[in-house]
Amino acid sequence: MRLRAGITRFFEKNAREFPYFLEILSLYYKKRVSMELEAACVRCGDRVLCIGGGPCPFTAVYIHKFTGAQVTVIDNNLDAVQAGNHFINKLNLRSAITFIHADGEKIDLDGFSLVHVALQVTPREKVIRHIQKCAAPHAQIIVRGVLPAQKAVLEPEWKASRIEGLTWYPTMVLSRY
């Protein structure tokens, strides 16, 4: 998984300077996000939190474009937040997507119906546990990549379902029973 996360970081870092990287990333995220949203049944009235936006927050962009949902993106890397804000402003999506510097282990989850956890988020287990403990009763979680220690990270009332058809690495939808 570290190799895949490293490749993603490489493309995101260089996408701002090389437009063809940006196009490759865009195509990659478009299909993946569409399948994730379908599996989680995300709708326009939902409020979505993306943990780990990086400098090119395509996941947030496509969540908003496909559903009309309001999206908040957080990242614990200040450079990524600054680049991500620039990216959002350049696409004129400032009114729909908010990008802030915050820590996934401590973020207030009040009002979010979906929390999306990026592949590169660390420490994954602590972030996922925080979400499960603090999320609204109806909230769902999308986790890209393998769950830490497989199902050992799940709180008792949560279940994980793998989204079929996604290439490169698995993605899970976590929901309460």
Image: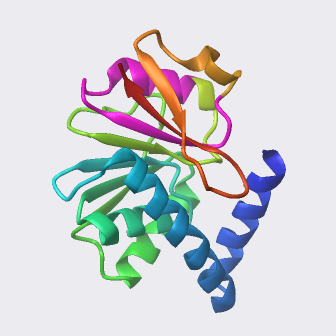
Q: Which residues are magenta?
A: 126-147
Q: Is residue 113 visible?
A: yes
Q: Is residue 94 left or right of residue 149?
A: left
Q: Is residue 99 above or below residue 20?
A: above
Query: What percent of the width, then of the height, locates residue 4?
Result: 77, 55
Return the x and y of residue 114 as percentages of the image width and height: 33, 42
The image shows residue 54 at horizontal and vertical percentages of 56, 60
The quarter of the rendered structure image containing the C terminus is: top left
Furthest residue in direction front, as rendered: 164
> What sort of colour scheme is used for the picture?
rainbow
Using the image as rendered, state which of residue 122 and residue 44 is in the foreground: 44
Q: Can you name the residue that lies furthest to the left here?
A: 45
For image coordinates 59% across by 18% down, the residue present is: 153
Quadrant of the snapshot with the N terminus: top right
Q: Viewer-proximal residue, 74 or 66?
A: 66
- Asked whether residue 57 appears in the rendered view, the answer is no
Total marks in image: 0
18 lies above or below 134: below
Residue 21 sits inside the magenta stretch: no
Residue shown at 54%/62% (left/top)?
32
Place of residue 6 in the rendered image (x, y in percent of width and height, measured from the top left): 78, 56
Please give left or right for residue 37 compared with residue 97 in the image. right
| Residue found 42% across the figure and 37% down from its top | 141
Q: Residue pushed farthest bottom?
A: 19
Q: Nearer the viewer, residue 24 or 103?
A: 24
Find residue 111 and report its image quarter: top left
